[in-house]
Amino acid sequence: MSGANKNLPIVSAETLDPEDWHDVRRQGHRMLDDMFDFLEHLRERPVWQPIPPTARDAFQQPLPQTAHSLESVHATFIRDILPYAIGNAHPGFMGWVHGGGTPVGMLADMLSAGLNANLGGRDQIPVEVERQVTRWMSELFGFPESASGLFVTGTSMANLIAVWVARTAALGTEVRAAGVAAGGKQLTAYASAGAHSCIAQAMDLAGFGREALRVVPMNDRFQLDIAKLESVIAEDRQRGFTPFFIAATAGSVDAGAIDDLAALAEIAAREALWFHIDGAYGALAMLAPEIAPRLKGIERADSIAFDFHKWGQVPYDAGFILIKDSAMHYATFASPAAYLQRVASGMAAGSPWPCDFGPDLSRGFRALKAWFTIQVYGAEKLGAIIAKTCGLAQYLRQRIEAEPVLELLAPVSLNIVCFGYRGADTDTLNAAIAVAVQNSGIAAPSTTTIHGRLAIRAAIVNHRTQIRDIDNLFEAVVRFGRLLNQQRNEHER
Ligand SMILES: *Cc1c(COP(=O)(O)O)cnc(C)c1O
C-alpha cells in the first residue's frame, strides 16, 4: 500500500471559501447594510454625475495576481462604482426605458447567486419556479396553460427567439439544417416605423437580412398604419415574396404608442402570418386594470416578448419570451446531444428542459427575482405602480401645456412624454437642455426624434418617481431652457 501511495499526486486542500466564516459574515452584513442605506437615501444623491478621471483609472489596472481583502475591494466599489452608475434606481431617472429595481429583487438575486443554480435543465425545483412564472404570464396574457416561456437577457433576445420560432413555423424544421435560402422562398416581415431597432436586428441575425423587414408608416397616433400594412403585404405577395411575420409594438420607445393589436391579429390570421408582440415594457400594463383594455388582442398573439426589468421593476436582467405553440418552440431549439440525454428518473429527468427553448445551455436563476417580486408585492400592487407612472406622465403633460415656453411634441399615450422648448430651430437647444439637466443631477431625461424634431423625452418607469420628481424635472427644464435660450439669442445678436 505505502509503495503505491508514494506515486499518488499531492493535491492541495485549498478552496475559495473563507477560512473564517465569521469574518465574511460580518463583512457581508456590512455590504448588505450599505445597499439598504443606498436605497433608503437615494433621493439625497444626484441622479447621475460626471465621472472623475480617478474613478476611471481604478479600472485600468493590471491583472491582480495576489489576494485583496473583501473589505478593500468593497471599499473600491463604494468609492468608484456605486456613485457613477447611470442612476436608474433614482426617482429622478426618466431616460430611455429603465426600471428602478427593488430591495426585494436585490435580496432574491443574492439568494440565487448563493444557490448558484444552472437552469439549463435537469430535475430541480428552480426550473419549476421558471415554469410557475411562465404559467402566471400565460394567465395574465390569456394564453393556454400549455404555452412555453423562457427568461432571457432582455426583449432584444426575446424578439430574436420569436423570429427564430416563426422561421420554423414558416419553413419547417428543415431550415435548421439547410438554412433559410434552401427552399428558395424570400420571407418578409412587417413592423411599424416606431418599432424598436432590435426587430430589424433580429431579422439580420436570423439570416433574412434587415431589408426583409418592411417598415410600415405610422398613423397620427404613432401606431402602425393598418391600411398601409395591408397594401405592403399585398404588394409583396404580388412580387413573389412570402410574408411570414408581423411584429406589433405594445408601448413604443419614442411615444409609448400601442399598435391596434386586435386589428393586427385579424390581418395575421387572414394572411396566415406569425403574430408577434414586442411588449418590452408595455405588455405588463396588463397588470393595471385601467390600462389592460387598451391591449385587447394581445391574447391572440403567437408570441409576446417583454421585460420584467422595466415596468416589472425586477433588477436587471430579466427579459422573457412567451410562445403559444410550445411544440413549435421546442422544434426550433431542441437538439440531441449525448451528454444531455434525458432519462425518466434521477437528475437527468424533467424533460423538456429550458435549454430546449432557447440558444443558451447554461442559464442563471433569473426566475427567482421575478417570482419573489410578484409574490411579495402581488400583481395588484405592481399594476397600481404601472398606472401611477402613467398618471405622472399626464401630470407632466398638463404642466407642459400650461407653460408658454414649452410645447408637447407627441401625444401622451402611456408613460412617455416628448416635449421641447417652443420655437423654430430648437433641436440644438433641446439637446443642450437635456444634457444640462442630466449634468445637474436633478433629473435625467433623454432625447429622441419626433417628426424630424429633437425632443426632450421623459419615460416614467421607476416606481419611486413621485409628483415632486416631475416638478423637479419640469422646473429644471424651464430654468435651463430660459438660460440657454438667452445665451443663444445673445450669441446671435
Ligand atoms: C427596451 C425595449 C426593447 C429592448 O429590450 P432590452 O431588454 O433592452 O433588450 C425592445 N423593444 C421595446 C419597445 C423596448 O422598449
Image: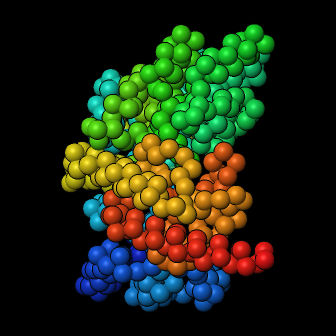
> As displayed, is residue 170 above or below residue 329?
above
Residue sitting at x 50%, y 44%: 411
What scheme was used to colour the molecule? rainbow
Where's residue 242, x and y in %? 69, 16
* Residue 307 appears in the figure: no
How many numbered markers are drawn?
A: 0
Where's residue 56, x and y in %? 62, 83
> As displayed, is residue 276 above or below residue 361?
above
Where's residue 167, x and y in %? 61, 24
In the rendered image, the quadrant that contains the C terminus is bottom right
Tell me the quarter of the picture where residue 436 sits: bottom right
Residue 175 is left or right of residue 253, and the answer is right
* Residue 215 appears in the figure: yes
> As displayed, is residue 206 above or below residue 106?
above
Residue sitting at x 65%, y 26%: 189
Nearer-the-camera pick, 37 or 72: 37
Tell me the quarter of the picture where residue 406 sits: bottom right
Residue sitting at x 70%, y 48%: 452
